[in-house]
Image (cartoon, coloured by chain):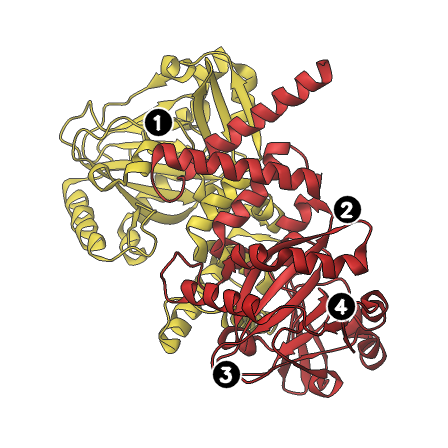
Chain colours: A red, B yellow
Amino acid sequence: MALSAGDSLDTDLKAHGFSVVSNALSVAELHSLSADFESMRDGSRPPHPPRFVSPAPRQIVAPKLKALVEKISSPPPARVRSGIYQPAEQTAKVGWRTGSIAFFSFPEYLNVWIPLPSGSAAIATISVVDPSVLSRESPELAEIAEQNGSLRLVAGEGKLVAYDNFHRRYVELPRLDLDKLGVPLTLNWGDALIMRNDVLHRSHDEGGDGLAVSFCVVGADTVMRRDHLLNMGASKFRQMAQLRARFLREIAVFDIAQSDHLPLAEYDKLLAELIKRENDALQRLGGSQLDYDQFDDLVYELTNDLRRRCSSERLG
Amino acid sequence: MFSPSARWQDVQIKGYAVVPSFLDAPEISGLIAAFEKAREIPRQNPNFMGHLLHKNRLKPFRNKLLAAARAASSSTQVYDRLGMGIYYATKLYLKWHLKADCLWHTDSTIHYVDPNYLNFWIPLVKPDRQRSGLQVVGFDALEARHPDLAHSLRGQGSTRVIQRDGSTIFRDTARRTTIAIADPNLLEGLAQTPALGPGDCLVMRNDVLHRTQDDETDRVAISFRVFGSTTVVSRQALMDMGSAKFNNMARVRPPFARRFAAFQIAGCDQMSNVLYDALYEEMTKREYNLQLARGATELDDTDFEQLIYELAQEYRDGAFRGG
């Protein structure tokens, strides 16, 4: 399933849910990303532990990834969101799963997973389960996993338990050896795995010191929905609260627009405006983040500004 | 002492009542001593200025508070569960919290958990009866001036009040509504400031707008919260939020993660607040024990999810149903 960027990713993704692209990034790009992660880990700039979210990956490789993914989704063009670093010590423990934090915001996206040279690993390994194989071997699990980017699977005594975070339920299934069903992939440095957000996968190097960066790529025709963002159970709330500043802004955009549905372009525009105003306010007021009242004041002001702008446009 | 002559009906009419000498001198000194002890415990979240009275120390006040709460209950809303005691001290306020408390508001964090309760606010240290108390706006006064606004605020909570462009703005962070009244000094004109000394009690419903009068004197108060036992809490109400509610909940992340977990443990979307609290307490205890076992200050996602699943199985098998 290894392809070069010129081949038909579209067909491969449709048939299997994933595809590997050889030589997607250059050595220099990989090293820039590793260095960015290390600067977060050693504390030389404010990190977001335990979530290593950074704008740098997008700045470094977004155009390249965008061009790559556009081959599958053009038109309309795709958008690359911020990257999240995934140190193996965190991800290997999680085991078989779908999706990532990106699913909290986007019901559908492509996960671009790129291993980075770090630590002692010479190559990177990851396993994925082809959804068509899963449908054949465990229709019940396939049904739970379909369009569900918030699933974690834990083997219990004689059973497999699906922690379905999106539907906030635990589903006990007959025992199933996912390691047998999975396709083990070996990626060379610079290769990228592209998979749908509902494809089951697990990284291998438990106890290892490997590192990867994961990007969420969404279609530009995506409609952002408040009910999707705020449909949560304990784990989702906990993870969103750990990334409070990010999700606070994402929720605030719906407040400002006074709408429960927003086209991605409009959503991004409001988000950018909010971030700009927030930065302006921080410069004016000092401090590293706005307090509760200051942030709510900002939301109130932006809501009014938007309303006034819409009224004057209607009148004009 | 519990005062049979206090105007308890005012809690229904105005939303608040004053009960002189509710606590006696030994009770006051005991609570001050407990406060000094509570201050020594480092707070997990430095943004949250409240120091909680240890649950075991609530017991001596239980009968007195529940008798008063019963007297203040109505036919439709009975308050019969003593929940917690929180200390508020003017000299311990963090800068932004003081700013927030000195603005008109109704309390948020507790409202998100249980939207019906009485607040027994009792100064323990208060050098001046006329200063550093609480200012309140009675529903009788609000109703007379702005009946629609009073109707909208009655029974609610988590409201932030700001003054902008010649108006008073009411922002309900739970319902995500905003009401503007074209009068910047609306509440100042309606406010009452009960003169209170140590041991006097201002009892008010959770929907009464209030604010800290000032921080000019060194005042320490305790606030007991008494809930009802018939309230049904829902996942939808907890989950229904805008940015302000999320911000508030995310600041004090672990308790709210456990509140969400309670619904997963019980496998339902609605439950009595008695069961809700029982599941919350159990989750808190287990999480704490697991943290100790792991030598961590917080569980990772995997352990946290595993714990919820285990508790859900125990619940399914009949554990801790009674609450």
The correct choice, above or below, for A251 with respect to B261 in the image is above
Numbered disc 3: what chain? A
Give B193 or B161, whichever is nearer the viewer: B161
- Percent x, y of residue B244: 50, 39
Cα distance between the residues tagged 4 and 1 = 74 Å
Q: Secondary structure at mark 4?
A: loop
- Percent x, y of residue B210: 37, 28
* Sequence-wise first label, 2 or 3: 3
Circle 2 is placed at which residue position? A221
Q: Amino acid at mark 3?
A: Gly
Circle 1 is placed at which residue position? B17
Give B282 or A224, whichever is nearer the viewer: A224
Pointers 3 and 4 in contact (C-beta within 8 Å): no
Query: Residue at 34% across / 41% down in the picture?
Result: A287
Pointers 2 and 4 in contact (C-beta within 8 Å): no
* Sequence-wise first label, 2 or 4: 4
Circle 4 is placed at which residue position? A5
Query: Residue at 20% across / 22% down in the picture?
Result: B130
Residue B69 picture quarter: top left
Instruction: For marks 1 and 3, give the one nearer the viewer.
Output: 3
Q: Secondary structure at mark 1?
A: strand
Q: Do the residues at discs 4 and 1 belong to one chain?
A: no
The image quadrant where one finds the N terminus of chain B is: top left
The correct choice, above or below, for A158 with respect to B232 in the image is below
